[in-house]
Amino acid sequence: MERLQKRIANSGFTSRRKAEELIKAGRVKVNGQVITEMGFQVSPKDLVEVDGIPLETEEKRYYCLNKPRGVISSVSDDRGRKTIIDLLPPELKQYRLYPVGRLDYDTKGIILITNDGDFTNLMIGPNSGIQKEYLVRVKGIINETVLAQLEKGLKTEKTEYLPALCDIESIDKRNQSSLVRIILTEGQNHQVKEMFEAIGFPVKRLTRVRFGNITVDNLPEGAVRSLTIHEVKQLRVLATQDKILKREPLHKYRVY
């Protein structure tokens, strides 16, 4: 069972707010009866009509995109900047798709796109245990002792972050920079940048290489692909995992 306004919105007919206005105006029928009660529950078998026209349930769609830098994680932008929807092929732009969460304008990497609001809430809601993995190029020569601050959980003047998992991928002594791999189960705004800024290592470049079980592997920058049924099911399971990460053995990093 679900609320009537949600059924209308999920059909792609209009937004949930507009659906509520239609219900109040007496323009919606369920099984031939006019319904004006907000929050009225309907089942999948119920026939819902708006202005006498039966609603068709919108097919749920799930995609992943390898977002380039310089692209907005939104369906539109009032400043005229390119959005992730602009990157979709013409045949997908007819659907009411939107991003699952966001990546900063200057961050590249994997982002999910869907028309399933419940799925989106499960992926990025406060209780989601979905892992997000990033490769971070920072200024300065970092070490495990410094990264231990992030692994213990970091508290700043603005907020408090859960423990993360960090590994040093490589050290570039010539250019005085480090490449770090970090795994989070949170998704606060600008989180990775603010975490590294707080420990004295500003971020130069940021790439999200994994969201749950979905990676950027074999997906060219700017390209999009459909998620398989198995991938979607696995994402739903991963979202229910514990948000507290467990440390795996550190690997040896490169110095050059």
Image (tube, rainbow, N blue to C red):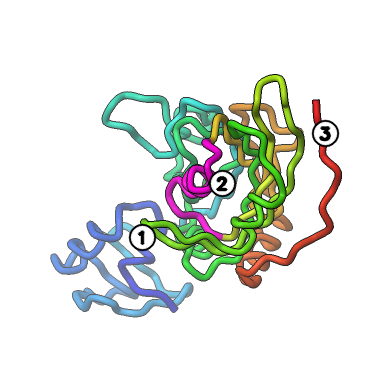
User: Which residue shows up at 64% across the image and 43% down it?
Assistant: 134
Whether residue 38 sits left or right of residue 235 in the image: it is left
Q: Nearer the viewer, residue 224 or 252?
A: 252
Q: CA distance from mark 1 to mark 2?
A: 30 Å
The mark found on residue 112 in the picture is 2
Report which residue position mark 1 lands on.
54
The quarter holding residue 131 reads bottom right
In primary-sequence order, the first of circles 2 and 3 is 2
Find residue 51 and report its horizontal and vertical position in percent.
23, 59
Q: Residues within 10 Å of mark 2 (few under 14, many from 20)?
A: many
Q: Look at the image and tell me in which quarter the N terminus lies.
A: bottom left
SS for dot 1: strand
Start and end of the magenta stretch? 186-202
Farthest residue toward the top? 174
Find residue 246 and report its horizontal and vertical position in percent.
73, 66
Q: Nearer the viewer, residue 24 or 32?
A: 24
